Image (cartoon, grey):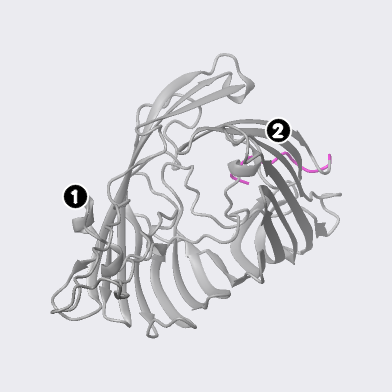
Amino acid sequence: MRLWTTGLGLLCCGVFLLGMPLRATAAEPEPPSGKSGKGQEQEQEPSPPPTPAFHNLRYEEKWTPASAPGEDWWDSLKAVPLGEAEGFFATFGGQFRLRAESWSNFGFNPAQEDTYGLMRLRLHGDFHLGSHFRVFAEGKSSLATGRTLPGGNRSSDTDSADVQNLFLDLRTSRTDTANWTLRLGRQELQFGRQRLLSPLDWSNTRRTFDAARVVYDSPKLRVDGFFSRHVPVRKYGFNESDPDDALYGLYASGRPGDTQIDVYWLGLDRQQGRFADGAAAETRHTLGMRIAKNVSGFSLDGEGAYQFGDFGDSDIRAFMTSLRAEYTFLSRGWAPGLLLGFDYASGDNDPGDGELGTFNQLFPLGHAYLGYADLVGRQNNIAASQGLRVKPHPKATLALDHHLFWRANRSDALYNAGG
């Protein structure tokens, strides 16, 4: 089976409507009145702060009045003052993305082939109301042309119009040391390398949650504690959170030196989990750790997690491990890079024995590690991947990936990308 994906519009990665302002160079100050300034040190105006970068979570962008220099037309929509009071301003942004997919031999059936288009529009407003209050609102519209493959236009393809983010922040005054934030409302969740919890940007509709969240943020440590309910997509109706499922936990991320270390606990309660062992109420806890390091073109990222809990009358005992290594030849033309990856997620040894060994992948970004075709999930899976990256242009990357898959245990099922 072959999948050829082509995005249309600015190399099919997405056309951002707002951002990327140019920074103005501070003008040299005039010498003091009555002095020529020659032979004297002149006080220079401070350089403007760097232009904020785009984020997958748009609400993480740090726009302020000082970081919007006003060189380009879209800068007029960044950090717009709301009156004359300090700290009252709004920022507006968005994204428009087109993608085309062409499939042949879909589901390993030669008779199943199709070509269709996907469109997504996102628009947001970020309202800062002084140093203690903030409201972030983002709407989306995700549409697809007629998809004739099995499943038709799926909930991952179509969500005609809905609210993706809408939350209130209550926070302490911003300082250079530490800040506390209470975040209430609909919000996307993303942690670490998104192996277990991600807004799933590859999906045309993305993923979101209704949640209460407390964030502690300092220069070297961030801790998120949250309780949430997943918001399933209703293609042509308003999306509402699922009262039968709950996701909660603590996620701590720190950077001692040049090493990134994450530790976390994630809890999942759902009325009905489904595995090869059957369907039953599921309470599952995940304890995990991630370590990442980048040195002179070499990057290494490793993560492991253990799961325990109850599945009906069975005990849960499951685990996963993931390792990703990449080396980039920075001094060579096109900066070629070599990638190796290995992923293991446990399966169940003996269905019906009173113990469930199948790992639950939770809410992941699977295709980043297990292939863009999204054929398998991080459950009862051994995966080996190899890849090559080149950059013919600073803003363009070409990638070639190869994947091999095995079931971790042959007595368990092969699980798809949706689990």
* Left or right of 334 in this view: 130: left
From what the image shows, is residue 323 above or below residue 38?
Answer: above
Near mark 1 (Cα within 10 A), the count class, few <14, some 14-19 or many ≥20, is few
Observer able to see residue 121: no
Measuring from the top left, give residue 368's x and y in whole percent.
Answer: 60, 43
Q: Is residue 240 magenta?
A: no
Give the residues drawn in magenta, as a range.
410-419
Q: Amino acid at mark 2?
A: His
The numbered dot on residue 403 is 2
2 or 1: mark nearer the eye: 1
**Quarter of the view holding residue 28:** bottom left
Q: Amino acid at mark 1?
A: Trp
Q: Earlier in the sequence, mark 2 or mark 1?
A: 1
* Left or right of 350 in this view: 358: left
Measuring from the top left, give residue 376's x and y in whole percent.
Answer: 66, 38
Element at badge 2?
strand
From what the image shows, is residue 397 above or below residue 110?
Answer: below
Residue designated by label 1: 73
From what the image shows, is residue 365 above or below residue 370?
Answer: below
In which quadrant will I find the N terminus? top right
Measuring from the top left, give residue 412's x and y in whole percent.
Answer: 79, 43
Element at badge 1?
helix
Observer able to see residue 247: yes
Alpha carbon of mark 2 to alpha carbon of mark 1: how far? 44 Å
Marker count (numbered): 2
* Left or right of 187 in this view: 111: right
Q: Residue at x 66, y 64 (%)?
A: 258
**Quarter of the view holding residue 6:** top left
